[in-house]
Amino acid sequence: MSIHTDNAEERMMKSIDSLEYNFGRVRTGRANPHILDSVKVDYYGQPTPITQLAGVKVPEASMLVIEPWDKSSLNNIEKAIRQSDLGITPSNDGHSIRLPFPQPTEERRRELVRDCKQYAEECRISIRNARKDANRAIDRDEELSEDQQNVEKKRVQNLTDKYVKEVEERLKAKTEEVMSI
């Protein structure tokens, strides 16, 4: 492989990683600890991720339990969750925080599927942009003959096809997850 295809593949993999991150933040009615990734807690004046302050468990499909290692941070964690845009009301029992995930309505599921499709489209655009940039770099590379350029462009196109197919597979799986009860 050449540097052009390596760079393109690296960008395409990052696009897939970004897609997975976005899919992880979509609330499906199932408890997913990644939904807390964006929530920062004021811990001694520092914005700190919940996962650095507490253990996050999934005792059942629709419940997250947050157990802080430092019990004095319990109220700050609860406050951060309430102020976040998660739309989940935490329940504090003095030792841990429970986050119940209600099942979304059919209409809400359809909205979530639309969001997932949008994330997938953004990922496909990013993959195609990586292909376009790689092809431009191949065209500008004076060390490559025309035949070598064609071979490199074919490799880039094969990578593009592979990653776009992966996006489709992940979107299909996420859509099934969102629409299942």
Image: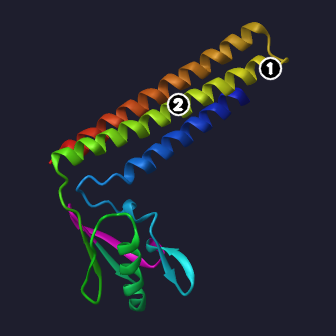
Tell me if residue 79 comes above or below residue 156 in the rendering: below
Q: Look at discs 1 and 2 and give the one toward the viewer.
A: 2
Q: Is the magenta stretch mostly helix, strand or loop?
A: strand
Give the residue drawn at x 30%, y 45%. 112
Scheme of colours in the image: rainbow
**Position of the N terminus by quadrant:** top right
Q: What element carries label 1?
A: helix
Tell me if residue 31 comes above or below residue 8 in the rendering: below
Give the residue drawn at x 30%, y 70%. 57
Q: Give the range drawn in magenta.
A: 51-64
Q: Which mark is residue 28?
A: none
- Asked if residue 60 is among those painted magenta in the image, a careful observer would answer yes
Image x and y of residue 119, in percent: 43, 40
Provide the residue designation for mark 1. 140
Q: Which mark is residue 125?
A: 2
Three-letter code for the amino acid on which mark 2 is drawn? Ile
Instruction: Please indicate whether residue 172 sits to the left or right of residue 181 in the image.
Output: right
Mark 1 residue crowding within 10 angstroms, few (<14) / some (14–19) / many (20+):
few
Residue closer to the observer: 95 or 112? 112
